[in-house]
Image: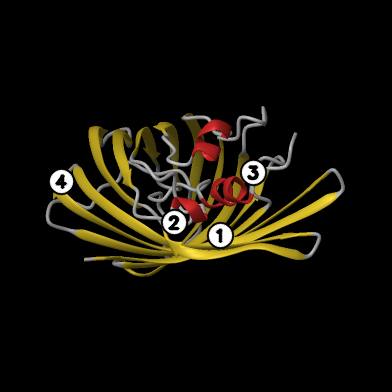
């Protein structure tokens, strides 16, 4: 495989994480806020990736701070908006080749829980969304064009644990010719997550997933595994921490995640 450009390498690393999953999970659940209720999530990510091609070692480090706001339009429909501030540094054999930071793309979504069986604890939701190109595509902070996505979410809640399955599709268009020619536009995603109730305030979470590799030069689809904890400070505030690892070379090697969720 030929070495990726700095823009494509950074874009793949920064865009590999869904924006609106319940932190620190990458898989979303079917839960909604309820009519008139809101939620704010502030998340932090720090990622590191290393690859060696033709004897040249490339190390990319980066991260993001994101703010996501959800509002309950009805009891089973949420409006969601979020935007990250991102940064990355790329070095080749210790020599800095890129060092950028900036605003990412504005993401807008609707979550519609269209089926809910309280007796079995099983529910289904659809989550369509778009991104608005507010980030600088020349720095790798977004594709430079509007993108669209759709995710089907299934949740099964039980007394000791909850399980979530996500199947998603996104259509990416790229403004820069270099990125457009080297990137796939149709991206599929599948993931499975579980939440275990350790105590009344503490949950242990796990997540595993795979998606289409946007890089046309690679036939390996990025796959990850994640573990973390969610601690309920009170009924309206959660703190979370997690670590995500790549299961193959196409996925970012290591990502540390932390955040706070506030409901009102």
Residue extending farthest to the front is 177
Mark 3 sits on what residue?
251
Above or below 186: residue 229: below
* Mark 2–mark 1 CB contact (< 8 Å): yes
| Mark 4 → mark 2, Cα distance in angstroms | 22 Å
6 or 77: which is nearer to us? 6
**Which of disc 2 and disc 4 is earlier in sequence?**
2
Name the quadrant of the C terminus.
bottom left
Mark 2 sits on what residue?
23
| Mark 4 → mark 3, Cα distance in angstroms | 37 Å
Which mark is in front, 4 or 3? 3
| Mark 3 → mark 2, Cα distance in angstroms | 19 Å
Disc sitting over residue 95 in the figure? none
* Mark 4–mark 3 CB contact (< 8 Å): no
Q: Element type at marker 4?
A: loop
* Mark 4–mark 1 CB contact (< 8 Å): no
Mark 1 sits on what residue?
242
Q: Element type at marker 1?
A: strand
Res 241 visible: no
Q: Residues within 10 Å of mark 2 (few under 14, many from 20)?
A: many
**Which of disc 1 and disc 2 is earlier in sequence?**
2
**Which of disc 3 and disc 1 is earlier in sequence?**
1
* Mark 1–mark 3 CB contact (< 8 Å): no
Identify the image quadrant of residue 125: top left
Mark 4 sits on what residue?
75
Res 127 visible: yes
Residue extending farthest to the bottom is 233
Name the quadrant of the N terminus.
top right
168 or 28: which is nearer to us? 168
**Which of disc 2 and disc 3 is earlier in sequence?**
2
Residue 219: % across, % down: 67, 27
Q: Residue at x 53, y 52 (%)?
A: 14
């Amino acid at each position: 495989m030929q070495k990726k450009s700095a823009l494509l390498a950074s874009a793949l690393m920064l865009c590999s994480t869904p924006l609106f999953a319940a932190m620190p999970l990458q898989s979303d659940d079917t839960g909604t806020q309820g009519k008139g209720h809101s939620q704010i999530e502030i998340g932090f990510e720090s990622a590191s990736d290393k690859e060696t091609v033709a004897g040249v070692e490339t190390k990319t480090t980066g991260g993001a701070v994101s703010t996501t706001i959800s509002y309950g339009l009805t009891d089973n429909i949420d409006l969601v908006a979020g935007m990250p501030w991102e940064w990355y540094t790329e070095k080749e054999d210790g020599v800095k080749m890129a060092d950028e930071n900036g605003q990412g793309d504005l993401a807008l979504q609707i979550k519609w829980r269209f089926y809910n069986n309280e007796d079995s604890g099983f529910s289904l939701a659809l989550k369509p969304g778009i991104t608005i190109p507010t980030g600088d595509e020349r720095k790798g902070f977004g594709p430079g064009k509007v993108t669209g996505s759709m995710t089907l979410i299934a949740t099964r809640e039980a007394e000791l644990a909850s399980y979530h399955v996500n199947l998603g599709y996104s259509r990416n268009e790229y403004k820069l010719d270099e990125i457009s020619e080297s990137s796939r536009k149709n991206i599929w995603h599948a993931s499975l997550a579980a939440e275990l109730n350790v105590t009344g305030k503490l949950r242990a979470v796990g997540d595993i997933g795979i998606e289409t590799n946007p890089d046309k030069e690679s036939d390996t689809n990025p796959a990850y595994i994640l573990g973390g904890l969610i601690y309920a400070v009170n009924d309206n505030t959660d703190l979370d921490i997690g670590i995500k690892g790549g299961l193959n070379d196409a996925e970012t090697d290591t990502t540390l995640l932390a955040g706070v969720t506030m409901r009102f």
